[in-house]
Amino acid sequence: MSRVAVVFTGGTIASLPDPVTGAAMPRLDGAAILARVPGLDAVAEVESIDWGMVPASHLSFAQLLDLARILERALARPDVDGAVVVQGTDSLEETSFAFDLLVSSDKPVIVVGAMRNAGDPAWDGPRNLRDAVRVAASAEARDAGTLVVMAGAILPADDAVKLHTDRETAFGAPNVGPLGHVSDAGVRFDRPRGARRRLTPMPLTAAEPVHLITATVGMDGALVRAARTTRPAGFVVAATGAGNTHADLLAACREAMADGLTVALTTRCVSGLAAPAYGFPGGGATWVEAGALLCGTLNGPKARVAVALGLGAGLDRTAMTALLAGPSTGRD
């Protein structure tokens, strides 16, 4: 039988309602969660690793790097076939992408959570965790990097996005769609993952802060200029449409780039990518001419992860350009 290391970090899946306020709080450790997942012992032998009970919205880059190192050590063991990270869903799209970049093993890493807490009669934790372990133990998941498994869908980490605040089917892959599906009947991959971004060797730290600026109507460069006082490592600009902003927002980022800061350009749209399609001041073509790096189909939060970790790894401009763009078209 396959052996899967499961790292428990907290989140909704580990939460119970407070008896006084009714607000959910992380309270269940790995053993308590596993005891509530019937049939898991028939899927794989599970090795539980209690890392903490941290809300996903509280996770830091230092903690992500610590978790990535734990995953590397577990997957280096010949008796472990895959790993699962159990966490909150608030930042799952970012953490899963970080593990996709950082973990070098060809064994799968599956990131999973729940949209309902453990005190809810509709708690989706048991099904999601059982599905995640099933995918982690699957030979078909090997060489697929980090995957997100939620509500039966198998999603690539670089495209997995939380699209709704509380639906059980909140997660999707808006650019490439699911790679496959999983249920108690088994794991089905409809297509392979293909090439993906990788960042090796793993950096010791991330470069911080990297500010994510979302362009909106009427926004000039004031926010970027104010953020310069924090001595940032770089900026990610989530532009409107195909990569377009107010001309003064570009002017402020030109000033940042002239001082040696990395500026990456993506779109605030749910899917698609920024491109040099428009030549008016602040248009995508003028951003590229100024030296901004394009991010393929990475959204703003994922692009920020790539910039922070890439700069932490000491990547030069050429390597950072390749990391952000991704293999071939910038997506799987």
Image (cartoon, grey):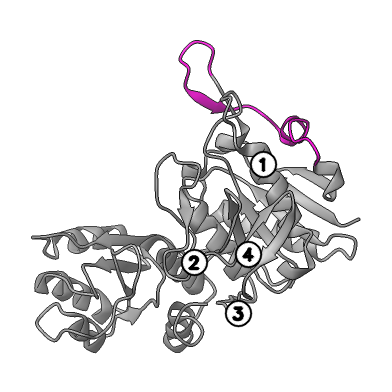
Label 4 vs 2, first from the N-terminus: 4
Q: Taking 51 as reference, is 216 above or below it? A: below
Q: What residue does disc 3 label?
A: 194
Q: Looking at the picture, which amino acid does disc 3 mark?
A: Gly
Query: Which region shows up in magenta?
Result: 18-39
Q: What residue does disc 2 label?
A: 177
Q: Where is residue 218 in the image (x, y as percent from the top left)?
A: 8, 60
Residue 160 in sight: yes
SS class of the residue under badge 2?
Answer: loop
SS class of the residue under badge 3?
Answer: loop
Identify the residue at horizontal 40%, vertical 52% (top origin): 163
Left or right? Give the position of 239 relative to 178.
left
Label 4 vs 3, first from the N-terminus: 4
Residue 203 in sight: no
Q: Looking at the picture, which amino acid does disc 2 mark?
A: Gly
Instruction: Give me the C-alpha separation between circle 2 and circle 1.
Output: 21 Å
Q: Looking at the picture, which amino acid does disc 4 mark?
A: Thr
In this rendering, the label closer to the viewer, 2 or 3 = 2
Numbered mark located on residue 146 in the image: 4
- The reply to whether the magenta stretch includes residue 30 is yes
